[in-house]
Image (spheres, rainbow, N blue to C red):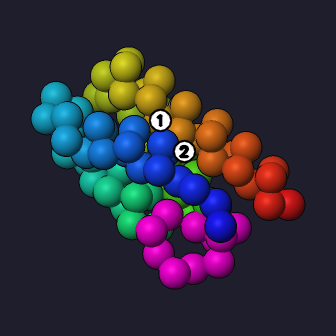
Amino acid sequence: MTDFSQIIKILDSIINDRTIPKNIRKVAEDSKAALNSNDPLDLKISTAIFLLEEIINDPNMPIYARTKIWNIVSMLEEKKKEIS
């Protein structure tokens, strides 16, 4: 079983940061829910990556939040390679 604890921790920091726009926090919540779902592992990871990549170019996103999201996407892509 793949451990998403570090990724979930970063997503939680985005979700709980009130300086980040609500729509971006919502996507972080949706990504966290996808990773915690009962779906197959590859589907969980692909869904989370898709959701995060959809908002990465949001002009209202603070730079530090964008960096966190890119880090999460990189970690998820690495986990996807591990299961392939």
Q: Could you tell me residue 32's position as x and y percent?
A: 40, 58
Q: Amino acid at mark 2?
A: Glu
- Asked if residue 75 shows in the view, the reply is yes
The image shows residue 33, relative to residue 15, as above or below, that is below
Give the SS element for disc 1: helix
Q: Residues within 10 Å of mark 1 (few under 14, many from 20)?
A: many
Identify the residue position indicated by label 2 in the image: 53
| 42 with respect to 20 (left or right) | right
Residue at 30% across / 38% down in the picture?
A: 14
Task: Name, please, the residue furthest toward the right.
Answer: 84
Magenta part of the protein: which range? 35-44
Q: Could you tell me residue 44's position as x and y percent?
A: 58, 67
Task: Name, please, the residue furthest toward the bottom.
Answer: 38
The label on residue 79 is none
| 14 with respect to 46 (left or right) | left
Identify the residue position indicated by label 1 in the image: 69
Q: Quadrant of the N terminus?
A: bottom right
The image shows residue 69, relative to residue 41, as above or below, that is above
Residue 40 shown in magenta: yes
